[in-house]
Image: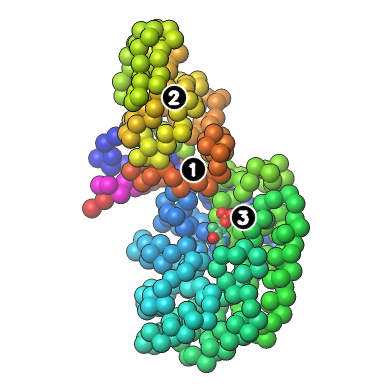
Amino acid sequence: MDSSSFYRDTWVEIDLDCIYQNVANMKSYLPNRVEVMAVVKANAYGHGDVEVAKTALEAGATYLAVAFLDEAISLRRGGIEAPILVLGASRPSDVVVAAENNIALTVFNKEWLAEAQQLYKGNKSVLFHLKLDTGMGRLGVKDKAELLSILEAIDHYPYFELEGVFTHFATADEIDTSYFEEQYHSFLQMLEWMPLKPKMIHCGNSATGLRFPDMVFNAVRLGIGMYGMTPSLEIKDQLPYELHEAFSFHSRLVHVKQIAKGEKVSYGATFTADEDMWVGTVPVGYADGWIRKLQDTYVLVEGERCQIIGRVCMDQFMVRLPRKIPTGTKVTLIGGQNDEYIHVDDIAKSLDTINYEITCTISFRVPRIFLKNKSIIEVRNPLLKQ
Ligand SMILES: *Cc1c(COP(=O)(O)O)cnc(C)c1O
């Protein structure tokens, strides 16, 4: 690592071996010939898009998926040549850029398609996956006549090619499978409407792949499970193999001082020392995604849980230390120290949300360090990017 990669001792570690293992496990768990489409939207759920994509491909994924065209282009600029699908809505005019970059787009209504056909003057073929709305109520076609007119329009236009058809489940991560089954049956029914099926049919996210590997058709769109996190706490005990959490978050004490009983800490002076105590300052704040609601939760210092006291500031927060601890000592916000571990799910619980939101929220002001075989292979700090 270049020592000038970053100048603040605060970093996220991404263990690429965990990503590799999670993808390889899914691949071998799925029936033969079912492919893994690695979902690397939102900068790979806050982990780092290109690095995760490369690792997933090495581990057996054959396709990548993102939410937006910009994210797909970011992967191409990072040297990724594998097929990429944009799951979300693009502008009809962006078909041109998609074609240039060999990126597959989602078609989800007939007006969109008609406009795209009008605007496309190129002569390279563009791949599409048709999104069916079976009950998520987000993107997708519901109506038989519309579906048939989309198929016909694609069929009659020489440069557009339908590579896939897919849907998305709203409750695949819930114990109660009744709504999931309803959606599944709608999907089967809508597939019946299609006289010719495209090459790829896919309906499963991580939860579906983990729980119903025989119901996913040709590919699983693997997101959260690839990062080693459970799709929901409800199904955590039912996972078919162990997930390896790739994300950890660390900093170091930059100032350690003793305060006397009655002294205050941070904005609003909301914390008052109930006795003489040692306080450490940690250079992480809400601008890093460590939001103000995390006041009173814990971090690890020398393997011990230490409470965040007073308000979290934009760039710093304070912790109560059990004793005088040297400046420079490592602080773990997510991850392990000795036998103690703070999981992403622990932070999610404190904030009354889901693990997905936590890793996405840790901003890219925090450099990502990528590890392979316990060694650093790359550091990504967008702030100091050339
Ligand atoms: C984000 C997303 C996924 C991945 O879901 P996970 O629960 O993270 O596996 C799959 N499909 C679509 C359409 C998505 O938007």
Q: Is mark 3 within 8 Å of ligand 1?
A: yes
Q: Tag 1 or tag 3, which sits nearer the N-term?
A: 3
Q: Residue at x 35, y 12 (%)?
A: 263
Q: CA distance from mark 1 to mark 2?
A: 18 Å
Nearer the observer: mark 3 or 2; the answer is 2
> Could you tell me which secondary element the residue under label 3 belongs to?
helix
Check if mark 3's residue and mark 2's residue have beta carbons within 8 Å. no
User: Which amino acid type corresponds to the residue marked 1 in the rendered image?
Assistant: Ile
> Could you tell me which secondary element the residue under label 2 belongs to?
strand
Q: Tag 2 or tag 1, which sits nearer the N-term?
A: 2
Q: CA distance from mark 3 to mark 1?
A: 17 Å
Instruction: Choose top left, top right, bottom left or bottom right for residue 49.
Output: bottom left
Q: Is mark 2 within 8 Å of ligand 1?
A: no
Q: CA distance from mark 3 to mark 2?
A: 34 Å
Residue 157 drawn above or below residue 65: below
Residue holding disc 1: 358
User: Which amino acid type corresponds to the residue marked 2 in the rendered image?
Assistant: Ile
Residue 31: numbered disc: none
Identify which residue, 26 or 176, lies in the foreground: 176
Q: Is residue 378 visible?
A: yes
Badge count: 3
> Could you tell me which secondary element the residue under label 1 belongs to?
helix
Residue holding disc 2: 308
Magenta stretch contains residue 90? no
Q: Residue at x 44, y 24 (%)?
A: 308
Q: Residue at x 42, y 77 (%)?
A: 92
What range of the chain is rendered magenta? 379-384
Identify which residue, 326 or 294, lies in the foreground: 294
Residue holding disc 3: 206
Residue 189 drawn above or below residue 137: below
Q: Is mark 1 within 8 Å of ligand 1?
A: no
Of the four image quadrants, the one with ligand 1 is bottom right
